[in-house]
Image (cartoon, rainbow, N blue to C red):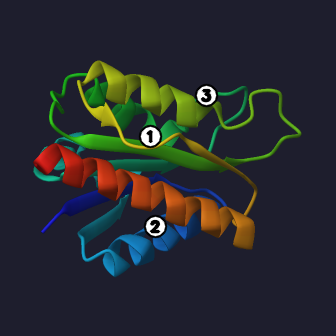
């Protein structure tokens, strides 16, 4: 069974909602899903997963949230070769650096040797139905990539 680890950072609840949407979709795909909040998670937990997902908001002037900084830094020491990753998150287009933490986490995943399984999903504030549809496609793409790598 494909194992999925979803880690989220959420201050308003939007990214936690995103994580729940993804969890539901992965469960429909028959994956074994574990979801956790970033400050309660060790990056090495990704080593036990086939699919690694980060859902994060962007803080202040386009930076990774404070509660995720240690996680972000520690991720850089991992070897996630053979793993599939995806990044997503919420933001507000009022800010110039809309959802840039999503891109920062993608860069770290790249440096770990993980394989990108889907294009990042960036959501304006809370997920609406069209965003949920995008997240479902995101999850399906990650799952498909993991299955193809398994062959």
Marking on residue 68:
1
Residue 130, relative to residue 97: is it above or below? below
Q: Is residue 82 left or right of residue 132?
A: left
What is the quadrant of residue 102 in the picture? top right
What is the quadrant of residue 93 in the picture? top right
Separation of residues labelled 2 and 1 (CA atoms): 20 Å
Residue 21, relative to residue 138: is it above or below? below
Residue count near mark 3 (Cα–Cα under 10 Å), binned few <14, some 14–19, many ≥20: some
Residue 135 in picture, x, y percent from top left? 55, 61
Residue at left offset 82%, top offset 27%:
96
Q: How many marks?
A: 3
Q: Nearer the viewer, mark 2 or mark 1?
A: 2
Tell me the element at label 2: helix
> Mark 3 vs mark 1: which is more N-terminal?
3
In this view, the residue in front, 20 or 40, is 20
> Mark 2 vs mark 1: which is more N-terminal?
2
Residue 55 in picture, x, y percent from top left? 50, 51
Q: Which residue is mark 3?
A: 63
Residue 31 in picture, x, y percent from top left? 24, 71
Q: Is residue 104 left or right of residue 96?
A: left
Tell me the element at label 3: loop
Separation of residues labelled 3 and 1 (CA atoms): 10 Å
The outermost residue toward the top is 111
Residue at left offset 34%, top offset 24%:
110
Tell me the element at label 1: helix
Separation of residues labelled 3 and 2 (CA atoms): 23 Å
The outermost residue toward the right is 94
Q: Which residue is mark 2?
A: 22
- The answer, for residue 99, to whether it is visible in the render is yes
């Amino acid at each position: 069974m494909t194992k999925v680890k979803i880690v989220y950072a959420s201050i308003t609840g939007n990214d936690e909602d995103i994580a729940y949407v993804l969890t539901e979709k992965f469960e429909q795909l028959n994956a074994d899903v574990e979801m956790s909040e970033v400050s309660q998670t060790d990056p090495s937990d990704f080593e036990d997963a086939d699919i690694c997902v980060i859902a994060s908001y962007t803080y202040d002037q386009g930076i990774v949230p404070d509660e995720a900084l240690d996680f972000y830094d520690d991720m850089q020491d991992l070897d996630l070769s053979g793993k599939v990753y995806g990044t997503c998150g919420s933001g507000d287009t009022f800010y110039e650096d809309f959802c840039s933490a999503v891109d920062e986490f993608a860069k770290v995943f790249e440096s770990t040797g993980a394989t990108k399984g889907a294009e990042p999903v960036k959501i304006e504030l809370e997920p609406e139905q069209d965003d949920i549809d995008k997240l479902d496609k995101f999850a399906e793409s990650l799952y498909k990539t993991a299955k193809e790598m398994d062959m």
